[in-house]
Image (spheres, grey):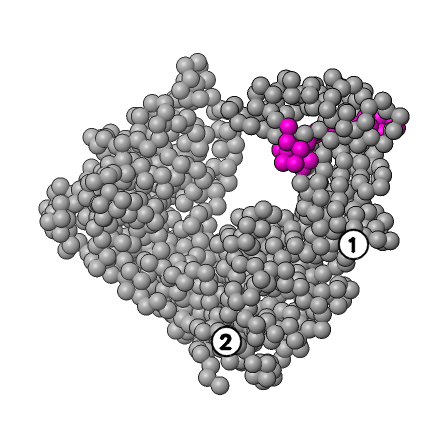
Amino acid sequence: MIYLDNAASTPMDPAIIVLLQDYMRDQFANSGAVYGIGLDAKNKIEEATETITAALGIPSSHNLIFTSGGTESNNLFIKGLCSPDKKTAYSGLEHPSIVETLKSFKAFDNEPFSLLEFSKEGRLNLSCLPLLKEKRIRLLCLSHVNHELGTINDPALLIAKLKKDAPQTRLFLDGMQAIGKIKIDKSMWLGLSGYSLSAHKIHGPKGIGLLVYDSKLTLNPHLHGGKQQFGVRAGTLPVPLIMAFARTIKLVTAQQQETEKHLLKLHTYLVEELRKLGLPFAINSSSGDFQCPSIVNFSLPPVEGEVMLHHLEKQEIYVGMGSACSANSKEPSKILMGIGLTEEQARCSLRISFSRNNNFDEIDKFLQALKISYQALFSTFSKGTLDR
Amino acid sequence: MSDQRTILVRYNEIGLKGRNRKYFEKTLVKNIKRSLPKDKGIAYRVPRGRIMIDLPVAVADEYADRLKKIPGISSYSIGISMNPDFDEMAELGIKWIKPLLQPGEEFKFCVRTRRSVKTFPQTSPEINCEVGSRIMSQLGPKGLVVGIKESQFTLEIEIGMSDTVVFRNREAGLCGLPVGSSGNVLCLLSGGIDSPVAAYMMACRGCRVHFVYFDNQPFLGRGGYDKVLKLSKIVNGYQGRAKLFVVPFQDIQVAIRDNCREENRIVLYRRMMYRIANEIARQYEMLGLVTGESLGQVASQTLENLAAVTCVTSMNIFRPLIAMNKEVIIKHAKKIETYDVSIEPQPDCCSIFMPDSPVTRGKIYILKNDEEKYPGEVLKKEALRDMETISVDFL
């Protein structure tokens, strides 16, 4: 099997699987219980929190809330801070867990402000920031790394420019695709109001995510119950998952530089080889400083991405896509359309996303399978309406 | 009270049969035996006109529930064998009826007795009266009334030679004919709402329905295939022993798309599906094809297009939904529990194969002309060669 859809999810690190099994067996007590093993569990959570803050350089000004994953983290922060009437803005290229959460405010006559026209390069053009002041936007929500394109919104640049052009606007970043793949500038935290993470995108277990937020802010809880996690997110804490998550973060941040170098080599190689194929492919992702090396997005017109995906699947090669070709769902990726691609380019796109586990041999096999399938499908897709 | 129960199974349509009635009864008993576990302590009796199952109390409710899925049964009730003592019988009736009473609401009941031992001192109407009045004296003040014609609960008493059995209220069965009494048919299953309902309806007419699915992998993912496995398993729950044939169809679709008139594509795909289904049915000695087509529902289901697909096979084609509207079909799908699976959002056809405006009145001579443009016969043989055959019982 060749797995090239690591932006969707990643295989768990075998060492983390072993640790998680141990944690599951040993740390079963409720961390809210007052007897010894409950206190031990509480200590384990504190240790995990310390591990994470140390690995990511999170300052004491920020709180950590463990959630069920990225979607919950995004919902918790955005709704907790802005629902129902605080004005928000987004670039239009974010993950549905941000876009749909913001759109839910429409029910309160509070439409989020879209900056899509300033996002044609796959990241926000900072010249638009004065608009936020004009529109009295309280929160700007962006992806740190775009999940379909891999383009980067640089926190340092954003924070500096926001401070100057729209000091009243807070910044929230979705960091799902960033951690472990690109360098995290530790100075970014002080300018960030919120940041979200998920374990399963970095070889950790599913079902555990994190919200890092400025402790000066008051978040309205959406789960009520016990007073766990500052009263912001009630519910018994999944101690083993939290411990495994902390170990995963520690591991990927320690290996980040090495991983980034490896991913960059794979990225460069794939893009070059795709170009060398001599087929009418178009690379939709970018390259350079504002591109995360883990993601390559390209279009292979006239062949539809979903059909190619299933043809590759037959050869046990797994890739991602941002659009569906099915007769039941004809809507192509909003993100690709958002950066100005035609409907055909968007419909005919594939997303390749690497992890540290991938190698050049896998890319060669992928390219070979891609070429053969493309040639086999080309005639079917290139024939339009037949007039006989 | 006894630790044994007796389930009384009734059937209606079989009862109307003449000299071949025995055959239908035997088939129904066989189907019941097959759907209940082969536990020790289960005994079957077949007195004229009904079937009795004697079984331990611990499994009675669970096993009785399974009878709800067996075509041919009109109703059944669970009974308890006891002494022919009116007080005991009334006590049992009170135990069953009491939880059904709602404060301030009237609840109608009646007692019906069947007395095969004519030496028993009271007549059937007298027994009804004796037991009924005892129940009324207890529950009358709580809203219970006697309603012979519109009773909401009927307590049935059977006084036989060896024992007396008191039966709880009747539970409705599926009616129809026992599966296997009519023969084997092959249903074209798409993954949508309609075809599983059509298959179920034919099972209720005594057919054993097998399934054929035309698979679009790798143009589409495995989602459609998985969905059809689930649907065939649910429908097979009403009959058992079905086969599912999965026919790879993408090469045929590609050939039709690449070579034939765009507007005719869907009718041409369907003509090939019918031809392949015909071939499988012939090979397995099945006696007809079943489809979920409903007149005018989509472009391919107009009278002309139905004629254009029917004419490629000499086999009987059964379309039990042909005159039903969608709401009624959906109601059936919900009842047989296929609806939730059917509406799972799995694509059934890649958009590349869909025409912009499909023909609504296909002309057979034009379709035949199109079919000369691709090697249909060769592709059909290849599809049949690569077909997967699945025993649905083992899913």
Look at 69% across and 19% down and name the residue there.
B134
* Callout 2 amino acid: Val
- Please give the range of residues in magenta: B146-171
Determine contact: label 1, label 2, CB under 8 Å.
Answer: no
Q: Residues within 10 Å of mark 2 (few under 14, many from 20)?
A: many
* Callout 1 amino acid: Ser
Image position of A131 with respect to A58: above or below: below
Specify the quadrant of the image occupied by residue B100: top right
Look at 14% across and 55% down and name the residue there.
A127
Compared across the picture, whether A61 is left or right of A282 comes to left
Q: Quadrant of the N terminus of chain A?
A: bottom right
Compared across the picture, whether A134 is left or right of A16 comes to left
Total numbered circles? 2
Q: Position of residue B27 (x, y in %)?
A: 81, 49
Instruction: Give the Cα separation between the discs numbered 1 and 2.
Output: 40 Å
Image position of B316 with respect to B76: above or below: below
**Which residue is tagged 2?**
B359
Look at 17% across and 42% down and name the residue there.
A138
Q: Chain of mark 1?
A: B
Q: Residues within 10 Å of mark 1 (few under 14, many from 20)?
A: some
Q: Position of residue A159 (x, y in %)?
A: 18, 45
Observer-nearest residue: B387 or A60? B387
Look at 61% across and 21% down and name the residue there.
B140
**Which residue is tagged 1?**
B181
